[in-house]
Image (spheres, grey):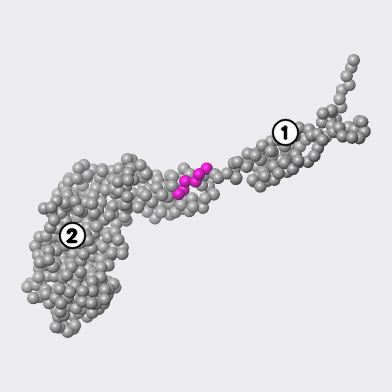
Amino acid sequence: MMRKKRKRGVSSGPCRSHGPGPAKAPAPPPSPEPTRPAWTGMGLRAASSCAAAAAALAAAAGAEQRPRPRLCPPPLALLLLLLLSLGLLHAGDCQQPAQCRIQKCTTDFVSLTSHLNSAIDGFDSEFCKALRAYAGCTQRTSKACRGNLVYHSAVLGISDLMSQRNCSKDGPTSSTNPEVTHDPCNYHSHAGAREHRGGDQNPPNYLFCGLFGDPHLRTFKDHFQTCKVEGAWPLIDNNYLSVQVTNVPVVPGSSATATDKITIIFKAHRECTDQKVYQAVTDDLPAAFVDGSTSGGDGDIKSLRIVERESGRYVEMHARYIGTTVFVRQLGRYLTLAVRMPEDLAMSYEESQDLQLCVNGCPLSERIDDGQGQVSAILGHSLPHTSSAQAWPGYTLETANAQCHEKMPVKDIYFQSCVFDLLTTGDANFTAAAHSALEDVAALHPRKERWHIFPSSGLGTPRGDSHLSVSLGLACSILIVFL
């Protein structure tokens, strides 16, 4: 028996409704050729947002809830759309993207640079290393941070800093692993490594000491003294560095002195450097050590070196291995000195090395003032001279005040020292010495709020730039100098 062929496009048995009505429903017209669904192809139009996906699911759920006598299996397109919608609910826009680690990158950069100081030799090199490490970290997290504004700000900031510091994009980078960055001839490197290991919770503390004028001393403890100290005296004498100054009388018959010779010894330190000696005297401020060398240590980056800033007038010494910087200047006939050194090294000395002016100040018998720049506090009385009386040919108290004020608007201890030196010596070069000493403080002292020192109110005068305090203190200083 021959079976009749079914006509194309006519739905058969199981997919027809069996509700009440005629026994045999007429066949539906042929379906048109199915079109390519919108979700196929590149997938760009498939449930473009979580809201669309949720709406599709809700619609599908609503459709399922409608009462139907019997349904045919859902078309393949609907199944795929539902699966895609379900997937979008747990991924894509509805899920947090892969973790953006820009905060970690920034934290590491701060950790790598927190101990650096722009006045210290090697700052640019270390800062550029940290910048390159920062840039590399941002690149590794760029995909996850694509829409993060903090990330894009960091990228722009890195580019600007690299331009400002002339950092090349290629080169060595810093690492947050202290074992990798440890350099025995770079104090900042192994100090940072100790901090990362938990040995030190804070960056190393630095101390400042300066000597200028006839002579004025600022100790590691920020005590300011005017001293006589004629002859050779040790400023610093610890296990790493020795600094000795020689002071001579400025004016015949006066106890006021000034520095005309400085000897600096950088002691041998393992593989970093041999012992190096530097010596400067009036009119001979060399840009080399006594042995003729200008650096110490091996390698391209020397662990110790001399930099001449102004021929015969200003040199700097940078000792990377002990994190120490020394400035030596000649102004007029005399020398000035400024030192910045880590506290743990500066305080590393034996009991026999306790006579250090930078550590303990001048002995009481050698001080002209009370340790705060006020001679009047010791004498307890004022000089019975008028303010217009000349202490030295060429300067009165008024003219000395005016000249020093031109260079130093803030009437602090450095201003007082300038006036004192002009009145006791008549040498205008001491104005430049006081001004340069204050500039050295700004360059090397680690704490800006301590750059200026103001006299204590020993006679009830207000602390700060009181003209009366300056006048009385300086007038009495001159009295004791010429007694």
Residue at the image position 38 percent from the left and 51 percent from the top: 110
Find residue 76 and name its label: 1
Report the residue at 76% width, 37% height from top: 35
Asked whether disc 2 touches disc 1, contact meaning CB atoms under 8 Å apart, the reply is no
Residue 104 in sight here: yes
**Total count of labels:** 2
Q: Which amino acid does label 1 sit on?
A: Leu
Q: Which image quadrant is residue 248 in? A: bottom left
Quadrant where the N terminus is found in the figure: top right
Q: Where is residue 170 in the image (x, y as percent from the top left)?
A: 39, 44
- Does the image show residue 189? no
Measuring from the top left, give residue 288's x and y in whole percent: 18, 53
- The residue sitting at the left extreme is 253
In the image, which residues are magenta? 98-103
Q: How crowded is mark 2: few (under 14 residues within 10 Å), some or many (20 or more)?
A: many
**Picture coordinates of residue 362, whole percent (x, y):** 14, 63
Magenta stretch contains residue 288: no
Q: In which quarter of the image is residue 209?
A: bottom left
